[in-house]
Amino acid sequence: MAYAYLFKYIIIGDTGVGKSCLLLQFTDKRFQPVHDLTIGVEFGARMITIDGKQIKLQIWDTAGQESFRSITRSYYRGAAGALLVYDITRRDTFNHLTTWLEDARQHSNSNMVIMLIGNKSDLESRREVKKEEGEAFAREHGLIFMETSAKTASNVEESDSGSVWCGLGA
């Protein structure tokens, strides 16, 4: 299928925050509750239409483990946007955001749009990171912010408020 634009995105963040589940929900419209750890990088793609133009999104899902960090760094090159994901039910994943953000800014071009994603919003009763904290971090670092649920697809697909992917400028 022909497309007018091609955008490369990278998904980064600690292991277990739901990066692969977000990708699967967006590309295949399904949720897989048990997912193997990503080894290195996985890839997904999807065509979307914005303003009557076909746009191909290439989405690179990176491993969150420290041991794969050097591999992940090479995928920043040429990326139009990054999803920096943390788990709202795990404070430690939020605490590591600064390290991920520094890495992203160091290894990408200065025009890359970064969106902060608080994932697992369906687990409100287990929340450890307030939405306001995510908003404040995003504001402080010039990021776009959104909470999502890969399980329920909340804010993963296009909606009136815009989706994760459209928020990155596609």
Image (cartoon, rainbow, N blue to C red):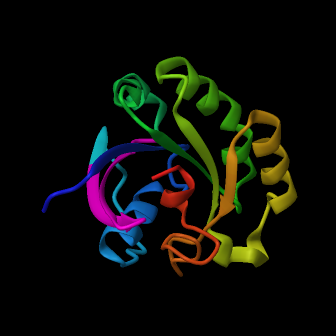
Q: How many marks?
A: 0
The one nearer the camera, 57 or 42, is 57
Quadrant containing the N terminus in the rendered view: bottom left
**Residue 61 point in image, percent of width and height:** 37, 48
**Most extreme residue toward the left, as rendered?**
1
**Residue 135 point in image, percent of width and height:** 81, 52
Residue drawn at x 56%, y 39% as measured from the top left: 113
Can residue 81 be seen here? yes
Residue 34 included in the magenta stretch of the image = no
The one nearer the camera, 41 or 54, is 54
Residue drawn at x 43%, y 27% as measured from the top left: 69
Tell whether 65 sits left or right of 149. left
Residue 45 included in the magenta stretch of the image = yes
**Residue 166 point in image, percent of width and height:** 51, 59
The one nearer the camera, 52 or 62, is 52
Can residue 130 be seen here? no
Taken as a whole, is the magenta stretch helix, strand or loop? Answer: strand
Q: Quadrant of residue 103?
A: top right
Relative vertical location of residue 167 with respect to residue 113 in this rendering, above or below: below
Which range of residues does the magenta coloring cover? 43-64
**Most extreme residue toward the top, as rendered?**
106
Residue drawn at x 50%, y 47% as measured from the top left: 15
**Residue 99 point in image, percent of width and height:** 64, 28
